[in-house]
Every structure is written in C-alpha cells, then in structure tokens.
Amino acid sequence: MNSIGFHRRVLFAAVLLMAWTLSCPSLTSAQAYPTKPITIICSSGAGATTDITARALASGAEKLLGVPIVVDNKGGGAHTVGASLVASKKPDGYTLGVISAGAITVRPHLLSIPYDALKDFTLINQFSRYIGGLCVMNNSPLKNIQDFIAYAKSHPGLSYGSSGVYTQQHLAVELLAMCKGLTFKHVPYKSGAEANTSLIGGHTDFSAGSGQHIIYLKQGVFRMLLVYNAEKRDPRYPNVPTLKELGCDDAPALGFITVGPKGLPDDVFRKLRDAFKKVAASPEFQKTLDNVDLPYDYLEGAELEKSLLTQYEWYKVFLKKMGVKK
Amino acid sequence: MDFLGNMIIGFGVAFQPTNLMFCFLGCFVGTLIGVLPGIGPVGTMAILLPVTYGINPTTAIIMLAGIYYGAQYGGSTTSILVNIPGEAASVITTLDGYQMALQGRAGPALGIAAFGSFIAGTIGVIGLMLLAPPLVSVALRFGPPEYFSLMILGFVVLTYLAQKSMAKALLTAGVGIILGTIGLDTMTGMPRFTFNVPELLDGIGLAPLAMGLFGISEILLNVEKRIKQELITTNVRNLFPNLEDWRRSIWAILRGTGAGFFLGILPGGGAVLSSFVSYALEKRISKHPEQFGKGAIEGVAAPESANNSAAQGAFIPLLTLGIPANVVMAILLGALMIHNITPGPMLVKEHPQLFWGVITSMYLGNIMLLVLNLPLIGLWVQLLRVPYSLLFPLILYICLIGAYVINNSVIDVGIMLLFGVIGYLMRKFDYEPAPLVLAYVLTPLLENALRQSLILSGGTFGIFISRPISAGCLIAALLLLFSSLLPFFRKKLAKMAEEVEEA
C-alpha cells in the first residue's frame, strides 16, 4: 500500500511537472517563434520521394530555426490524409506539411475531401516538381517522337502503363493521343515502378514515366521520347522535346510544396518561408534532389498561388472533359 | 561468373566488425519481435528506418534484413508455445505446433522449426546467389495474365486450408474478398466502401487486420479460459527432434524450402503465402493427412522452412529489378533510396559490395539465429513464462502501439480492435480467420491483374489460356480443384460417421 501511495505521489508530481512544461510555451509566447519542436506532416510513407525531400528539408531548417523538426509520416489517400491533417491543425507554426500539390489541385475534383483545397492552407513554398517522360525500351526501333507518332498511327491501341488513373502522366499521354489523333490502351498500375517493370517485361508497349523512369534512363534500359508535365526541356536530356513543342496541350506539373494551416501569423510565415528557401537552395538539399532525380524548381508567394490556382482550374476543366464525376 | 570472387567480396564486407554487430543486432531484434506477438517486422522496420539514415547503406540493409529473417525464426516460438502467432508468417504453425506443445512435444517442435529455418535459410541464400541473374528473366515474364492465373491458383490453394468446414472457409474468404476491395479503385481512381473516411482510401491495413483477427481475438479467447500455462512450458528442454521426427520432416523441410523460395520471388507472394501453401502441400501429399492439425511435425517443419526461404527469395526482385515483392521489401527499397542507391538491374554491377555483402551477411545471420534460437531458447521461453495477467495486457499494449505506428493512425487502432472482436466471434462459431486474411491479401492483386489483362487483350478472356505460364497455372488450379473433391467428400463422410458414433 505504502509503495503504491508513494508511486501515486510521484506520478502526481510528474503530471504536474509535465503540465507546467507544456504550459510554458503559452506563458512565454511573447518570445520569438519558434520556442518548441516543430512537426512536419509528410503526406507519404517513409522512404517515398516526398518523405526523403521532407526529411532533408527538416534537417536543414532545424539548424536555421534552432529547434528540432520532427517529420511525421501520414501517408494514404493519394496525399489527402496528410493534407487534411495539416488543414485541421492550429495555425501556430508548430505543425506544417510537406505534400504533393495534387492534394490541393487534383484530388478535390476526384474525391470528397474533408478540407477546402483553396482556402484551408497557408502556402509557404514549392521546392521541386515531378517531370514525366514517355519511354520505350532502349532497343526499340522508335528513335524519336516522330517515329513513335507514325508507328502509333499505323498501330492503333498501343498499350502503356502509368502509376494510376488521372495522374498527371496519364492525362499527358491522353492529351498527346487527342492532339495527334492516336488511340492507346491505358493500363493503370499502383506505382510508376510497376508500370516501368511491365514495360521491361514486354507486357506493355511504352511507359508513362512519372520520375521513376529516370533511373532506367541512367541505366540505359529505357529511351525517353517525350517530356511532359513540363514548360521547357529537361536540361539533363536536352534532345528530348516537350509535349508543348509538338503543339499539344500539356497537363501541368505537380509540385512538392510546404504548407501550414490557414491563418499562419505573418512573422511565423516569413520566418518559415525564408528558412525553407535557404535550405532548398543549399548544396546539401540540391544533392538530395539529385539523388531522387527531381529538378529544383522554387516558387513562393503570389507566383506559387497563381501556379496552384492555374493547376486547379486546369484539372477541374480537363477532368470534367474526361468524364469524371465526383 | 566468378562465384568464389563474389563470395570473397561478400564475406569481406560481412565480417567487418560494424557489419557483424549490426547483423547480430538485427537478428536479435528480429527474434525478439518475432517472439512477441502483435508487433511484426514491418512495424519494427518502419520504426527503425529513420535510425538507418545516419549509417552506411550496406550496414543499414544488413540490419533491416536481419530483423526480417530473424522474425521468421522467432515467430514460430509463440505459435508453438502459446498458440499466438508471433508473426503473420507463423500463423499456420499454430495448427500443429501448439498441438505438439499440448502433447508435451514443444521441444521437438521448436527444434524442428529452428533447424528447418536454418536449412531453408541457408539453401535460400545459396539459391539467391546462384539464381538471382537467371530468375530475373522469369520474373519479368510475369505480366498481368500470369499474375491473374497465379492468384486463381492461390484461391484454390486457399480452399485446401479449410480445417473444419469448406463452406465456412469459402464464406470467410468471401468476406476477405469484399474487405480487399475497400479503398481507391486503381482502374478508375474512385473510392469504394470508404464512407468518406480518408484513411480508408488506401484500404484496410493488413497489419491492423491481422493483428486484430489473430492477436486481439486470441487474447480475448484466452482471457475467458482457465489459465493453464504450465502445459506449454513443460518439456521444452528436449529440443532435439528424434530420428523418427527427422525422417518425417526432412522432405517436408526441403519441399517447404523450394516452395517458399519460389513464392518469395513472386511479387505479392512472400513469407505468409508460402507458409500456407507449403502446409497445404504437405497435408495434401501426406499419407496420413488426418494427423494434420493434431500435432504432425511436418505441419511445423514445412511452413517454418518455407517462410524462411521466402524471406531470402523476396530479395531477388528487389536487388535485381528494384521491385519490392512485399511491404518489408518496400521499406528496404526506401532505405536504399535514401542513400542514393537505386535497386535495379545495375545494382550488382554498381554496388557489388552491397549486393554480395548483404547476401553473405544473411548466411552469417542464419548461423547467429541458430545459436540465438536453440541454446538460448530458454531465454525466449522465459519471456513467455511471464504470467498471463502481465503478458496479455503487454501483448495488447504492443498490438496497440504496433497498429498505431505503421501510419500513426488512430483509425488503424480502431480497425484492429474491431477485427479483434470479429475474430473472437468467428472463432467462437468455428470460422477460421486465415482464409479471410489470405483472400483479403490476394483480392487487390487478382482484381488489378484481371482488369489489366482484359485492357491488354481488348476484353477477350483468351489471353489467360494463350500464354503458357498463365495456362499452366490455370490447369494446375483445375487439377487441384478436382483432386480435392474426392478426399473432400471422403473426409466429410468420415467426419459424419465420427459424429454419428459420438452421438
């Protein structure tokens, strides 16, 4: 009994101490932000591209902001689970998100989501984006996109794999088909890697790459004939034309963005934006991007807002045209 | 191919003190979480992934791999001693392992599981070394139609698992199929049965489902029983199976190794499926199938061997193609990507140290595990001697944490608890949870493969019989189905006769 009583008292003291510690930041809120650890909600599972970049961003910003930054993986629902969590948090700067812009600009047209995509976030910055590429096997007789279009005209119904239906790369290939009067069979896979493997295994005729294909380009397994989801050519592959150069419409690229809940205080917002901007431009972060074959593409403020709004409207119109009903 | 040279490179890496230490650490943690029910290798590896950011990639993979195959060893211990599978791949081991323990033969059961695991692990590693390159081309030939037919074969095998009633097994498999369709439809991107819960968009997690059906329900069942803990801890000293045991097990071990290795290579196969398949195989070809479920040592030897060789086999698609065959491999893929290493056809050439180092470390790891699991089995058993009044809340606690950490999701915890109650009721009414879980795992693969195949063929079902591997699987499924009919009715008749006699 005695010992239980003792333990209870210790426990009580511990709870009091904890309560006091927790209440501290509110007592000292006059102090400059940040005064306690920051959580970054990452909208993908551990090890995914979004996660790798989020962690690199966090470890860089930790040094600049002087507090620990924890990356919390909340994957699922095509990035909407993580995004809805961020939207539901207090705008105190201690819970932020690194998400795919698709959660804001594409998914609202496809799914019922528990947040208002255009209103529930404070957009901080964008540091990279996906670039897609149409790939065939390296030993294919099709040497360039003109060969490909001619072949596809005479062979209607070529099959291709993508990382899923209504993804930016699926839509880009369908835009190519509409623009050049071609017909393809779209075989959706669960990931870009599976779509690539089906091309290697000879089960599909080409692959609508979403970033994963760069690995196979480097290894000389694939040949890229076309770059899409891109305004200009990929500097790493200067000989490959873009979808826009062919005179076709293109599905806008989705970026990797940092966000907070709506209503982030101005001073907090500025501090975070400047810190992330500095990290994104640092050689360490650039190396991380290079490792996962992502381009550096920085946007902030009005420019970022405009880019996302344009994307949002584009996907809204085009998905309706594709016959999507939510 | 310079086999010896590669071995030398590999052992040179594996014998580095740091790597040895991390290999041991991985094996130790693997055995521990294998023994502890509720928390499996996936959850553990996910928790430890951030730890590996700071260490050398080869060392990181050696440790993470150790957790995976170590868990295959440890998983059998609780299956045998307390009828709670420590790990999903050891679910089937409970059928005969626990019966052996009840008969006072826990020692030989644990022994054959460890020896079987060692033999399978060793053969698996050698197989991995020799077969990785040629197997790439075979695995690549598996397109959607081949997957579809293979899954059909899987479903037929599923019906073989029926212990009590085939009708009940089919019913629970049906429920598993429905559960498997929850989430985003890959083909149209539309949510199905998600009721606007964003967490359900990716479907119900396998881990919470399995933890609920196998872990929580087991605790609930045990809580209402009178505690009879002494039954399981007696006689665990005599670990060496006798000659008769060996005679009955050795072929089961070798067949389990073969089946497990092959199924491990196939994406979506892995340790769980292979343990079920090899058990069904042994039961089917056994001269005395009636002994299965009543303490047949083959029923322990085969699946425990199969899940180990499957664990090695699963590395083949990852290290040669960059395709994760299962969730564990997906985590390893992530660990490699963090270190700027892209698994794929070029991995062996670009990173021979990593490729051969990891493989040879598995050989050393298997030896460590044999030591950890045989002479030290007492230590793990001690872990189980903890009174149930402490053990059950502890298991529950670990299950709760385990379910939570996978996605940091409270909904997963809720799902686990819900299926805990469902599993409890199912067992009360003699419905087995295993067909449900297996059907649940196979359904998304089957559905995708079917729809992908039909897109490719333009809607013609001929694609499934015009391709040789696919046709072969379908023919095998048909043959199995017909061959099962006869013994199935015979068994039914025998059972009815038995019931008549009892009455």
Image: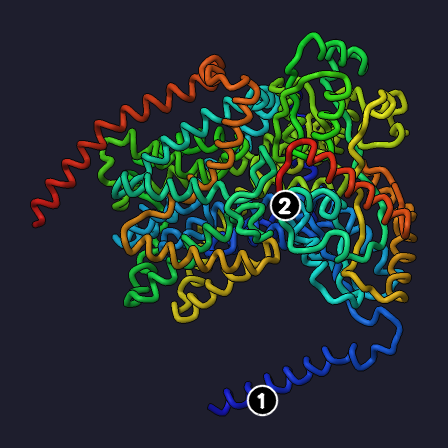
Mark identifier at residue A111: 2
Q: Of the residues shown, which amino acid type is indicated by label 2?
A: Leu
Q: Is residue B480 left or right of residue B401?
A: left
The residue lying at 59 percent from left, 28 percent from top is: B129
Residue B343 vertical placement versus B297 (above, below)? above
Mark 2: which secondary structure? loop
Of label 2 and label 1, which has the lower sequence position? 1
Residue pictured at 78% horizontal, 10% vertical: A147
Residue B261 in sight here: yes
Q: Position of residue A122 (x, y in %)?
A: 81, 57
* Amino acid type shown at disc 1: Arg
Identify which residue, B129 or B368, lies in the foreground. Answer: B129
Q: Position of residue A103 (x, y in %)?
A: 71, 47
- Report the residue at 45% width, 24% height from top: B149
Label 1 sits on residue: A9
For disc 1, the chain is A
Of residues A156 and B400, which is closer to you in this image? A156
Q: Residue at x 61, y 54 (%)?
A: B407
Label 2 resides on the chain identified as A
